[in-house]
Amino acid sequence: MIVEVKNLVKRYDRLVALDHFNLTVEKGEIYGLLGPNGSGKTTAINCILSLLSYDKGNIEIFGKKMSPDAYEIKKQIGIIMQNIAVFEELTVYENISYFCSLYINDKNQVRRLTEEAIDFVSLGDFTKFYPKKLSGGLLRRLNIACGIAHKPKLVILDEPTVAVDPQSRNKILEGIKNLNKEGATIIYTSHYMEEVEQLCSRISIIDKGKIIASGTKDELKNMISLGEKITVEAYNLKEEQIRQISHIPNVAQADYKDSILYIKSNKGKNNLIHILDYLQNNDINFGKIYTELPTLNDVFLEITGKELRD
Ligand SMILES: Nc1ncnc2c1ncn2[C@@H]1O[C@H](COP(=O)(O)OP(=O)(O)OP(=O)(O)O)[C@@H](O)[C@H]1O
């Protein structure tokens, strides 16, 4: 076990930001903490890192109790927080080298690790740039290099792709996968379900400070009744026909707007065939059809009744 959090409670005055929050991260995982803005992700990370005191609960990292002065544990953690934390008066190279030297004494090793970190985030063309000359995406990549240059065993990234261009985003995601391949365990917080799906081996979904579901993405999707979403371009449907469609086996919901029929089906076989049969048997003209499997947003929606995104 790399991280074990049990029954964590954190209050900000009357607001319960973490409500008996539990998390278990095993060695070698990329663990995703997915939740909307304000759900408690940053608070959880800050508590795990002992940067924030908490009201109740137990936190262990590498099998040892975490505390503000657990320096041996902290040395082996790389932290990349939402807010960029680099020195304006240092260049890209100097920033990474400085952060690395906080953990490593040997100058040659610092030099080698700094160069590796620069390659890792593809900032080789910018080593002499000062942070204020970097675009948002490059600055985030510098922030990441500063957090991982010392090759920590555990890397925690809190929403590292917010306000980042697609090219930098892909580089960041690729980099995280590579870090993991090299042996680091990763905790990754995000409100972007696509990233979490793409990256993470296991996921916990958090809402209002509570973990509402945990598992692999397939396990999470199997927790809900939604099997697929079927969209059909269908012309001149009458109300009675929409009502009949909503009674086709496994159809949970049928809505019709601007000549598009939106169907949510429960899990089952041949859902699409049943709908096409109905359309054909009733001489309904239809055009484009597509089906989508549930996303993590659907999991969130079914459990909480609201969308993951604002
Ligand atoms: N220092 C603070 N004092 C009071 N309330 C706070 C403080 N920090 C966070 N909160 C509140 O605690 C809740 C959880 O916030 P937190 O920042 O942990 O969420 P988050 O999931 O990380 O969201 P975001 O992605 O927007 O940062 C929110 O309601 C937030 O307003």
Image: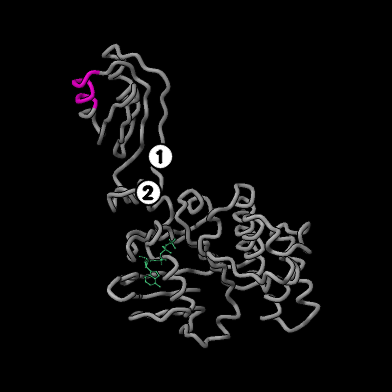
Mark 1 CB near ligand 1 (8 Å cut): no
Work out whether residue 253 or residue 97 is closer to the camera in this orientation and state it.
Answer: 97
Marked residue nearer the N-terminal end (2 or 1): 2
Q: Quadrant of ligand 1?
A: bottom left
Q: Amino acid at mark 2?
A: Lys
Q: How is the image coloured?
A: one colour
- Establish if 47 lies above or below 142: below
Work out whether residue 264 or residue 276 is closer to the camera in this orientation and state it.
Answer: 264
Counting from the top left corner in percent of width and height, residue 191 is at 45, 55
Residue 1 in view in this figure: no
Residue lying furthest bottom: 69
Region of the chain picked out in magenta, as a range: 238-245
Q: Residues within 10 Å of mark 1 (few under 14, many from 20)?
A: few
C-alpha separation, residue under disc 2 versus residue under disc 1 = 9 Å
- Establish if 265 lies above or below 289: below
- Establish if 176 lies above or below 265: below
Is residue 275 shown in magenta? Answer: no
- Point 60% across, 62% down: residue: 180
- Specify whether 225 is left or right of 94: left
Give the residue number, with chain letter if any, for mark 2.
Answer: 221
Q: Amino acid at mark 1?
A: Leu
Give the residue number, with chain letter if any, for mark 1.
Answer: 293
Counting from the top left corner in percent of width and height, residue 308 is at 38, 51
